[in-house]
Image (cartoon, grey):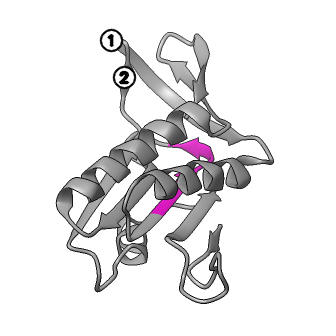
Amino acid sequence: MRDVSEDSADGGTPDVIRLIGVRETPLSVDEVFAAVGDPAAGGTALFVGTVRDHDHARAVSALSYSAHPTVERELRAVMDKVAADLPVTALAAVHRVGDLRIGDLAVVVAASGPHRAEAFEACRRLIDDLKANVPIWKHQTFAGGDDEWVGAC
């Protein structure tokens, strides 16, 4: 994972994308929230995805995420698009890979903007586009021993 708060598109002001990460270690809501903090932001929205104990009314006993080597590049592309389309102040996104337990944080994304409406819209768009376009796959095993792979995120 890398903190991109020092990056900038024009070499001057910090980039809107403040944190991108795909990691095997536990995620921190505080880290993501702090990454999008900005004096110009009037609203901040945060989404936390956790591993649940069921899927489609079936008990889940194990879950693992894996990612393609281009995962951070693809995540950046999603974030760049959100930043280009919406008036956001800052964006951050981190996702777990590897074996997770029930209750573990799987993904944390946040957006800040001038007002709450922009922050909510950007946060929702960020998690939806991440799930649809970033090459992260979920492998879950059910209590009965059968398993399945689920597309992105």
Q: Secondary structure at mark 2?
A: strand
Q: Identify which residue is drawn at 35% across, 51% down.
A: 123
User: Image check: 148 left or right of 121?
Assistant: right
Residue 57's disc is 1
Q: Are marks 1 and 2 in contact (CB under 8 Å)?
A: yes
**Segment tinted magenta in the rendering:** 92-100
Vertical comparison of 88 with 51: above or below: below
Mark 1 is surrounded, within 10 Å at the Cα level, by few (under 14), some (14 to 19) or many (20 or more) other residues, namely few
The three-letter amino acid code for the residue at tag 2 is: His
The three-letter amino acid code for the residue at tag 1 is: Ala
Q: Secondary structure at mark 1?
A: loop
Residue beneath disc 2? 54
Q: Identify which residue is drawn at 38% across, 71% down.
A: 89
Vertical comparison of 149 with 92: above or below: above
Measured as percent of width and height from the top left, residue 82 is found at 48, 51
Which quarter shows the C terminus? top right
Measured as percent of width and height from the top left, residue 142 is found at 50, 17
Measured as percent of width and height from the top left, residue 37 is found at 34, 78
User: Image check: 121 left or right of 16?
Assistant: left
Which quadrant would residue 109 be assigned to in this image?
bottom left
Q: Identify which residue is drawn at 57% across, 56% down.
A: 80
Residue 130's disc is none
